[in-house]
Image (cartoon, grey):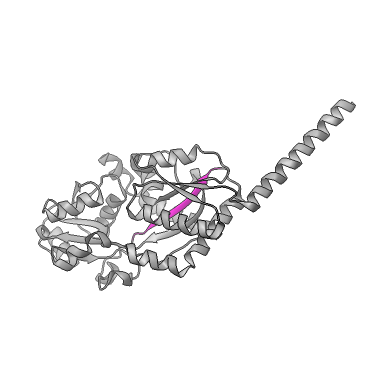
Amino acid sequence: MKKTLCASMLSAVMTFTASHTFAADSVNWPTRPVQVVVIANPGGDTDFNARMMAKHFTQITGKNMVVTNVAGGGGTLAAEQVKGAAADGNTILFTHTGQLIVNEVAGLSDDSYDAFDISCIAGVDKGAVFVAGESAGVKTLQELIDKAKANPNSVSYGTEMGSFSHIQGLMFEQLAGVKLKMVDAGTVSEKVVALLGNRIDLGAISYGSVQDYVTGGQMFALGQPNSERNALLGEIPTFKEQGVDFTIDKPYVVAFPKGTDPAIVAKMADIMKQITEKPEYADELKKTFKQPVAYFGTEEAKAVLAKTRDDFMQFKDVLRQSK
């Protein structure tokens, strides 16, 4: 009886100590360098946003945030690495809806955003524009719509099949009432080369990647798919202004392995909010990717992802056929 009582008391003490240690770790987090796994190669918009987060995270917390780029598999390799990591708050996934939702819709992954503990949306890409090359023979959105309606499939749209840019093209088709010729044109840099070489007519690309060609007259910016004008893009009108109710965002998502202490998840969201309130952070986004500051806390972020998933699911069959 005494042995049983002692064992029970020892177990209770150990549980109490472990829970209080866990709570203390949550309060003091981060206690060591944090790894953020990015789904993209260095140099692009996703990597840039992750590195800006890491830079200011270190300034605020005094602990390093180490960026690890794990490209490949449409982002599934990075997602699987974080999914299998210890849920101790020391591994974070930095991703966007092109991986977190489109991969599920396209059948590349069985997981949705709820396979992770979502912390926040750290930013939103508002720099995308639809641009036409000289081969398209159009300089305005209305000219594009008129040509595509008169001759379906006559305008080629460069994309990566089954990707976020594919969703962008499909949504535009649906809302503008046109039919484009979908062409697998590769990465952003490859699409830019294809536009300049007159191998494709149209693409959805970050304005920073094509600004010089638009200014030089080799490409024509037809519209930005934002609900309101991103003034950083100059005088490029939204699609809505031109009669096509087409808006599509690419939020950058911060997520932890499932089972991470909610206190850590919430603390990361608060740190990211602090980062977005720093003027120097806003300046860096504007200068590099013409991106205004945006932030959504945990519950808002989940609501954004749920709606995005619903919007994208209507294109499930098309995306899966393209693979």
Q: Would residue 2 be found to the left or right of residue 223 on screen?
A: right
- Pinpoint residue 245: horizontal percent, then vertical percent: 30, 65
Q: Main secondary structure of the magenta part?
A: strand
The quadrant of the image that shows the C terminus is top left
- Pinpoint residue 223: horizontal percent, then vertical percent: 24, 66
Q: How many marks?
A: 0
Q: Is residue 8 visible?
A: yes
Q: Is residue 180 visible?
A: no
- Pinpoint residue 12: horizontal percent, then vertical percent: 79, 37
Q: Residue at x 58, y 56 (%)?
A: 267
Q: Would residue 37 be found to the left or right of residue 186 on screen?
A: right
Residue placed most toward the observer, 227 or 6: 6
Is residue 54 positioned above or below 274 on the image? above
Q: Would residue 71 be found to the left or right of residue 219 on screen?
A: right
Residue placed most toward the observer, 45 or 60: 60
Residue placed most toward the observer, 274 or 120: 274
Q: Is-magenta flag for residue 109? A: no
The quadrant of the image that shows the N terminus is top right
Q: Is-magenta flag for residue 252? A: yes
Task: Examine the image and state in which quarter residue 222 appears.
Answer: bottom left
Q: Residue at x 83, y 35 (%)?
A: 9
Is residue 196 positioned above or below 5 on the image? below
Write down the region rendered in magenta.
248-258
Q: Residue at x 55, y 39 (%)?
A: 86
Q: Residue at x 17, y 52 (%)?
A: 193
Task: Examine the image and state in which quarter residue 247 appears.
Answer: bottom left
Give the farthest residue toward the right: 2
Is residue 129 positioned above or below 159 on the image? below
